[in-house]
Image: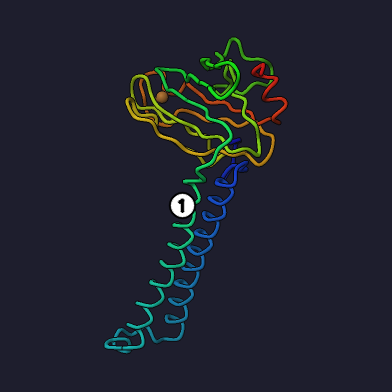
Amino acid sequence: MSMYNMLLLQDMVSWVGIEATLFHDYSMLLLCLIMVGFCLFMYLMYSSGKFIIKGYSSSDYLEFTWTIVPAFLLYSLGVPSLYLMYFMEGASKYDLTLKVIGHQWYWSYELNDLDSEIAFDSYMVSLGDLNYGGFRLLEVDNVVSLPFMSKVRVLVSSGDVLHSWALPCLGLKIDACPGRLNFMNVSSVRPSLVFGECSEICGVNHSFMPISVEFVSWDDFLSCYGS
Ligand SMILES: [Cu+2]
């Protein structure tokens, strides 16, 4: 989860998140190389006393270079970006479906694949009720349990206004639109407890409808929901 003085992304628990982090690191590396290369080029030109426009006008070689190099850089960014986009869409097969509905200002969840239908609301734990060591503005009264190393299809909608179900540790952000069903596949690679918040300004208590999901083994998941 996000901590004080954190500069980089959070530790990811899903393949999508890990791939997104790798793409972010790769893009930053490319950006730094371009910046360093440009500064070095300018310094060498300046220090060698050849900082003269005349020498570079009508240069076929220069025009060829400044066309090919940016094209190659864009290509090297575009290919992994497209790969990541299709990877996020995920597989069509899934083990479980979680339905998420945003309300002003809480989340309600439904699990319909078990023996009995599970439906519950998840409200933020207020500051006065927070246990010692609990995370302020992130703890909820009903944590969603999901099995790890499983493909969970998350269907997201809203009962009133726009919300967004976002869990940065999973590299996940799904808009909850009233009258519309958005979906994404969620899969955690390890047991974990992840936190998120509504990421679409939805009213006066927008900051007070956090999301908390724990990924447990199948046995713990089934015993948790009594199936
Ligand atoms: Cu909201």
**Residue 77 vertical position relative to residue 220 in the rendered view, above or below:** below
In front: 8, or 20?
20
Residue extending furthest toward the left = 58
15 in relation to 143, above or below: below
The residue at the point 47 percent across, 63 percent down is: 31
Q: Position of residue 54 (x, y in %)?
A: 29, 88
Closer to the camera in the image, 95 or 142: 95
Q: In which quarter of the image is residue 104?
A: top left
Label 1's element?
Answer: helix
Residue 8 visible (yes or no) = no
Residue ID at (52%, 16%): 119
Q: Can residue 220 be seen in this view?
A: yes
Specify the quadrant of the image occupied by residue 205: top left
Q: Name the residue under label 1.
A: 86
* Crowd tier of the residue under label 1, counting other residues whose Cα lies within 10 Å: few below 14, some 14–19, many 20 or above: few
Question: What amino acid is labelled 1 in the image?
Answer: Tyr
Q: Is residue 202 above or below residue 47?
A: above
Residue lying at the far front in this picture: please name it.
115
What residue appears at the point 48 percent right and 57 percent down from the top-left corner? Answer: 83
